[in-house]
RNA sequence: GGCCGAUUCGUCUAGCGGUUAGGACAUCGCCCUUUCACGGCGGUAACACGGGUUCGAUUCCCGUAUCGGUCACCA
């Protein structure tokens, strides 16, 4: 029996979670659920300089909003706690020390200046790559070039040092990526990466391997930007003696700018007027506010649906998926290899679809709130009718209220072009007749009945209804365009309809 | 620049040796409608290039080009 699937999402709390990170988390989640496995959340906070307060909570909130459930890890706990890497430093130090003891890593005492000098020297000499590697390390100050007792003395004296991987000079490293197939890299292209920093914390490379191993991770699903260092990770598994239980890798295509070159950035979002973060984020240092999908009115299910299809496709022609449907059809083998341009228009279209699908009663409270905040009376029944009338016309729920302007306000002005073209003798006769009919009418004031009343009135007056509808609309709403007029009248009510008709008759001179 | 990866309509993508190269967004047109939308129907639009392999390449292989990623005591 094979081990049950365990995947992890391992963001760094250096700021708000990027929308690309949400997609990475989503793919991990879909895969875990599909395989009946677990989804872990680990916080990779090994860089103290880049720590941003609030970022970790933001990550938790964003995942919860998106509907990505964490089975184990930061925020929910589990048998491998702690799930914050800054609280696991002893573990990494132990493993790094083990590598040194086994001759697979070494201490290095070089200062930043010395490293710079080395790189400059190599560049000046036109070396193929200015890196700390099997060749150059013998010219540096480390435990391979220094005598053992001097190394001991430096460490005992508290001199800062790092632990570097002793990367082999000539070795072919292979890995079988689930999305890309076999990737081969020669070890000479991998430098002697720092494993343990001078502050005692590990770098990503060491920490992620140690944790993935200890936490029983079976599949590492992450962005393509990690592909170049994946061979290094394979090497680390080997040196740590864990190669036989090494997880499988799947490197996801990147999210690219809507136009131009490069990967999607905050700047593109600002330029394009769309969000790039799931939730709104206020930078604790500058106070700057970055917009979020949630605050911009994107529904979580629309955002997820949109993101899921950016780089993956089930091969069917289905476009709309619930989370359960995504889980049922997800397959890593069908993840696309090339980067995907970020097209916010498609996100809007998905949102439109999900707004239409939402029950009126769920959308109504927001409309009511907006209306009441603006000083209008808007009981729940009215809000619900407005939603029913307008939700099919908008991409965002908050646009419904804007579309309903003519419902809340009697026209202050009338569209001049429509008036000039349609407000003729027949229109005036029709409006007058309808006005009178309304005053006499005592039945229920609902769209169907209003429609009949208007039709009958026009028949009696000998006026073709189609000829005067535009005039009626402009008289009632001031505009030549808008939703169903009968329903509009029903919503504003009989008194308001009568009053608006009267106002039009008085205001719109011949 | 070295290394790694990618390359089908403007965009997201289906395709896994033989298809009129399919769908969606966007765009255009028509229909529906009292109007504007929504919706329905339809149109325009793609296999980067050059060599192979093959009876036959969008599909397999090799180059070229272009794009992307990566080369930190950041993740």
Image: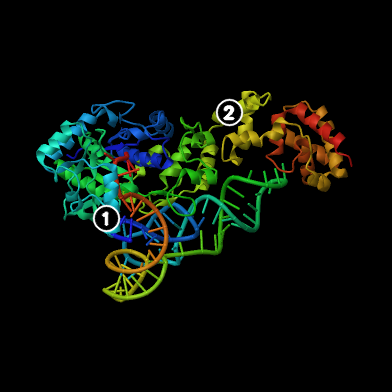
Q: How many other residues sit within 10 Å of disc 1, few (<14), some (14-19) or many (≥20)?
A: some
Q: Under tag 1, what secondary structure?
A: helix
Q: Residue at x 77, y 46 (%)?
A: A466
Label 2 resides on the chain identified as A
CB of mark 1 within 8 Å of CB of mark 2? Answer: no
Residue that mark 1 sits on? A122
- Which image quarter: residue A465? top right
Query: Is A357 on the left or on the right of B48, as rendered?
Result: right
Q: Under tag 2, what secondary structure?
A: helix
Q: Residue at x 86, y 45 (%)?
A: A424
Front residue of A65 and A387 = A65
Compare marks 1 and 2 and give the one earlier in the sequence.
Answer: 1
State the quadrant of the C terminus of chain A. top right
- Which image quarter: residue A363? top right
Label 1 resides on the chain identified as A
Percent x, y of residue A282: 48, 31
State the quadrant of the N terminus of chain A. top left
Q: Is residue A231 visible?
A: yes
Q: Is residue A467 visible?
A: no
Residue that mark 2 sits on? A366
Percent x, y of residue A326: 38, 41
Numbered circle sitting on residue A54: none
Q: Residue at x 69, y 30 (%)?
A: A491
Percent x, y of residue A277: 46, 38
Using the rendered image, report if marks 1 and 2 lie on a common chain.
Answer: yes
Front residue of A108 and A445 = A108
């Amino acid at each position: 029996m094979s081990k049950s699937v365990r995947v992890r999402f391992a963001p760094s709390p250096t700021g708000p979670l990027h929308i690309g990170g949400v997609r990475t988390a989503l793919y991990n989640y879909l895969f875990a659920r599909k395989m009946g496995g677990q989804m872990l959340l680990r916080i990779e906070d090994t860089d103290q300089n880049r720590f941003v307060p609030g970022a970790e909570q933001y990550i938790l909130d964003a995942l919860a909003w998106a509907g990505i459930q964490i089975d184990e890890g930061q925020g929910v706990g589990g048998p491998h706690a702690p799930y914050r890497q800054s609280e696991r430093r002893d573990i990494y130090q132990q493993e790094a020390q083990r590598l040194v003891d086994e001759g697979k890593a070494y201490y290095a005492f070089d200062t930043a200046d010395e490293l710079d000098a080395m790189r400059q020297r190599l560049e000046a000499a036109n070396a193929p790559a200015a890196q700390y590697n099997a060749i150059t390390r013998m010219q540096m100050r480390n435990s391979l070039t220094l005598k053992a007792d001097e190394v001991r003395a430096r460490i005992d004296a508290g001199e800062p040092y790092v632990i570097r991987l002793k990367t082999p000079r000539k070795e072919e490293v292979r890995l079988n990526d689930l999305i890309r197939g076999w990737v081969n890299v020669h070890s000479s292209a991998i430098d002697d990466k720092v494993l343990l920093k001078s502050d005692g914390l590990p770098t990503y490379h060491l920490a992620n391997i140690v944790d993935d191993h200890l936490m029983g991770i079976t599949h590492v699903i992450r962005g393509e930007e990690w592909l170049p260092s994946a061979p290094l990770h394979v090497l680390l598994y080997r040196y740590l003696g864990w190669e036989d239980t090494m997880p499988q890798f799947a490197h996801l295509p990147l999210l690219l700018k809507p136009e131009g070159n490069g990967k999607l950035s905050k700047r593109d979002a600002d330029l394009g007027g769309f969000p790039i973060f799931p939730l709104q984020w206020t930078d604790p240092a500058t106070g700057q506010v970055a917009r979020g999908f949630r605050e911009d009115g994107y529904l979580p299910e629309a955002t997820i649906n949109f993101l899921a299809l950016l780089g993956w496709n089930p091969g069917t022609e289905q476009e709309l998926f619930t989370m359960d449907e995504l889980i049922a059809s997800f397959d890593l083998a069908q993840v696309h290899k090339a980067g995907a341009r970020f097209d916010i228009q498609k996100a809007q279209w998905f949102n439109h679809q999900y707004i239409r699908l939402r029950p009126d009663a769920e959308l109504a409270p927001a409309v009511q709130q907006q209306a009441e905040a603006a000083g209008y009376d808007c009981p729940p029944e009215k809000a619900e009718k407005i939603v029913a009338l307008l939700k099919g016309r908008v991409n965002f729920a908050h646009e419904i209220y804007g579309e309903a302007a003519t419902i809340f306000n009697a026209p202050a002005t009338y569209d001049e072009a429509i008036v000039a073209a349609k407000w003729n003798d027949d229109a005036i006769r029709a409006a007058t007749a309808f006005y009178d009919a309304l005053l006499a009418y005592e039945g229920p004031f609902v769209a169907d009945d209003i429609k009949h009343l208007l039709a009958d009135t026009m028949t009696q007056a000998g006026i073709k209804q189609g000829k005067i509808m535009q005039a009626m609309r402009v008289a009632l709403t001031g505009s030549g365009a808008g939703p169903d007029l009968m329903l509009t009248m029903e919503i504003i009510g009989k008194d308001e309809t009568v009053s608006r008709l009267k106002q039009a008759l008085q205001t719109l001179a011949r």
